[in-house]
Image: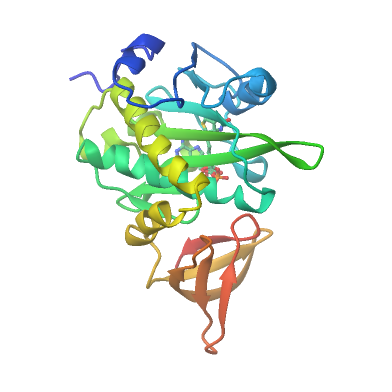
Amino acid sequence: MNPYNTENLYENLVKKELNTSFIGRNIIHLDEVDSTNIYAKKIGRNSMDGTVVISEKQTSGRGRLGRKWQSQEGCLCMSIILRPSVSIQEISKITQVAAAAVFLALQEVNVKTMIKWPNDLLINGKKICGILTEMVTYKGEVDFIIVGIGLNINNKLEDLPQEIKNSAASVYSETGITLSKVEVTAKIMNNMEILYNEFISGNFRMALNICRDNSNAIGKRVNIIENNMLKAEVTVTDLGNDGELIVKYDNGETKSLIAGEISVRNV
Ligand code: BT5
């Protein structure tokens, strides 16, 4: 079977499978763009809540902290524009809300993933999805946010660039299953709307529990990396109620780590 799903993500195909009231009700589908997050940032101020930008190809896909997202054929690249009325401090939680939504979407098509705090999904320990949440403020308040999701669905392993070949994979490369991009896109939006609505009504726990129950790190040893330097080897004990990573040092000290300041790598 052709591992690529050539079906295009046209708005009406996705919309047929949506049961949302606002996420994905306005879809901008592009053949090629530098980055769907950059595009969404440009149009965000004048876009309706829940607008989704999808591109078949990205020429400069972005990761966190200036890193790159390699957008090979078979990768689903989408950005959701949202206007949450929550404080700036709450915004980082939306990455975990999105991770939980992608997890549920894949679970619905019988693909089991693990969530790597705070923004990755893994299959067999390999990264298949990364999430980049960015915020645009206006007069010191959140104007809108962009939740960028890059999900390797039908990519062939040999097409992944050399530098990520050992750490990255796709749903297809790990399971042999070719999924419909349209179906997965709609399922992500459907699950995102449920979890996001809970989150903005004060219930972050629903998404958090999914991240906690399917964490690849809880109970494991990890390296803490800060500014590209190895800081310590610790044991992850839990996720805190605000989504922070709780770790225990070998001297017994416990600390909460906030996403964005550090990253963790399995030992
Ligand atoms: C991320 O950053 O994982 C966030 C990726 C977000 C991508 C989406 S695509 C739609 C939207 N538009 C954008 O421009 N971006 C968002 P980070 O945690 O910093 O991880 C980046 C690292 O993941 C890289 O340094 C590579 O090691 C690895 N990587 C890059 N491309 C990958 C891929 N396609 N699959 C798996 N790993 C990859």
Q: Residue at x 30, y 15 (%)?
A: 16
**The N terminus, quarter of image:** top left
Q: Nearer the viewer, residue 2 or 57?
A: 57
Q: Residue at x 59, y 57 (%)?
A: 259
Residue lying farthest right?
139
Place of residue 142 in the rendered image (x, y in percent of width and height, measured from the top left)? 70, 39
Q: Nearer the viewer, residue 169 or 192?
A: 192
Task: Give the left or right position of residue 238, taking residue 177 as reference.
Answer: right
Residue lying farthest front?
201
Task: Give the left or right position of residue 189, taking residue 224 as reference.
Answer: left
Where 120 falls versus 225 (above or below)? Answer: above
Place of residue 68 in the rendered image (x, y in percent of width and height, measured from the top left)? 59, 36
Q: How many marks?
A: 0
Q: Residue at x 39, y 28 (%)?
A: 159
Q: Nearer the viewer, residue 236 or 47?
A: 47
Task: Give the left or right position of residue 40, taking residue 177 as reference.
Answer: right
Q: Residue at x 34, y 44 (%)?
A: 103
**The C terminus, quarter of image:** bottom left
Place of residue 17 in the rendered image (x, y in percent of width and height, measured from the top left)? 29, 20
Residue lying farthest bottom?
251
The colour scheme used to paint the residues is rainbow
Examine the image and state in which quarter residue 135 appears.
top right
Residue 155: in sight, yes or no?
no
Place of residue 20 in the rendered image (x, y in percent of width and height, measured from the top left)? 38, 27
Where 96 falls versus 252 (above or below)? Answer: above
Residue 58: in sight, yes or no?
yes
